[in-house]
Image (cartoon, rainbow, N blue to C red):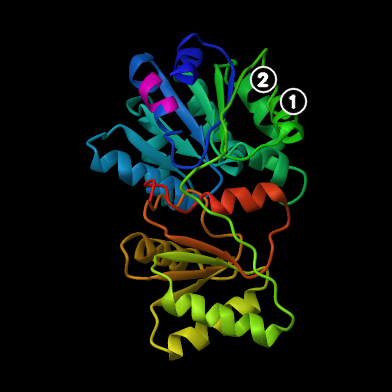
Amino acid sequence: KEIIESVLAGKDTLAILPTGTGKSLCYQLPGYIFPGSVVIISPLLSLMQDQVEQMKIRGEKRVVAFNSFLSLSERKWVLQHLKRYKFIYTNPEMLQNESFISSLMQIDISLLVIDEAHCVSQWGYDFRPDYLELGGIREILGNPPMLALTATAGEEVRQDIKEKLHMIYPREFVYSIDRGNIALKVEHFSSYQEKAERFLDLITNLKGPGIVYFSSKKMAEEWDQILTDKNLRVACYHADIKTESRILLQQQFLYNQIDVMLATSSFGMGVNKENVRFVIHFHPPVDLESYWQEVGRAGRDGG
């Protein structure tokens, strides 16, 4: 409520909300109240497609994902009819496209949303520098109010987000990340053999669906082979798999055709699956933010 009120008052707003507590409501509801369009900048194509599909299922036809999945003729058509859309999803790289920017400049933008805003700080400095351009892009678009949303941001990252996005006297809402239905457990092993046996035991006996995180693509693939040979419904997901295959794997996981996803950190952001029952870290992630982002994918339904 506080976040939506801040957005409706036209204030720049930074909101840190736990996974699965309705971040999209914070811009969709104002979107229906505001006269103009809402532009949502999202890091992953698959996440964008999923959100657009969800909105269409609920009956919203004025929604589009402007990204590399569109053919040249589709892009042309969308650009010519951009003012028809209430919700326009895109990614930072697309905002470097001159014809897209000039089309956006022609329409009334009531709100600019940066979804998964921790990516500004996490990715902006190295492999996705376009994230650091978003503050400047906003100015080109006439400084519409901005809402930055994420489930993951410590003090330093929040400061970075506000600075890099050129937020103007932002209101900040930080909710507790404590989710009472999630238990955390650490298990120690004296050898790899012992760890492998315990892992096999867990995967065989735990009630899924579940996600297992590896820091090594090779090891994720090895375990995929071992568990597939045992007739378990598992799949392997990492950045080297083709985009189409990754989207298919996500869909299969969402529709319970895969019980356990063996993945690197490239899996999970925006995968809106409510009934994940366990998350195992075979290897620890790179930082604490990644850890709580990843464990937060369990039990979104409160179970």
Out of 292 and 84, give the one closest to the viewer. Answer: 292
Q: Which mark is residue 203?
A: none
- Residue at the image position 39 percent from the left and 67 percent from the top: 208
Q: Looking at the image, which is closer to me, 52 or 141? A: 52
Residue positioned 70% across, 46% down in the render: 123
Q: Position of residue 92 (x, y in %)?
A: 60, 40
Residue lying at the far top in this picture: please name it. 9
Q: Residue at x 57, y 40 (%)?
A: 116
- Range of residues picked out in magenta: 26-30
Compared with 247, 147 (above or below) is above
Q: Is residue 35 above or below residue 214?
A: above
Label 2 vs label 1: CA separation? Answer: 7 Å
Identify the residue under disc 2.
167
The percent coordinates of residue 41 (x first, y second) are: 53, 36
Quadrant in the rendering for residue 25: top left
Residue linked to disc 1: 163
Q: Amino acid at mark 2?
A: Met
Within the image, what quadrant is residue 240 found in?
bottom right
Q: Position of residue 282 (x, y in %)?
A: 63, 70
Seen from the viewer's position, the closer of residues 94 and 284 is: 284
Residues at circles 2 and 1 in contact by the CB criterion of under 8 Å: yes
Q: Is residue 83 above or below residue 179?
A: above
Q: Quadrant of the N terminus?
A: top left
The local crowd at label 2, few if under 14, some if 14 to 19, many if 20 or more residues have their Cα within 10 Å, is many
In the rendered image, residue 244, in percent from the top left (x then y), is placed at 44, 65
Q: Is residue 73 visible?
A: no
Q: Is residue 62 visible?
A: yes
The answer to which quarter of the image holds residue 245 is bottom left
Whether residue 35 is in magenta: the answer is: no
Q: Secondary structure at mark 2?
A: loop
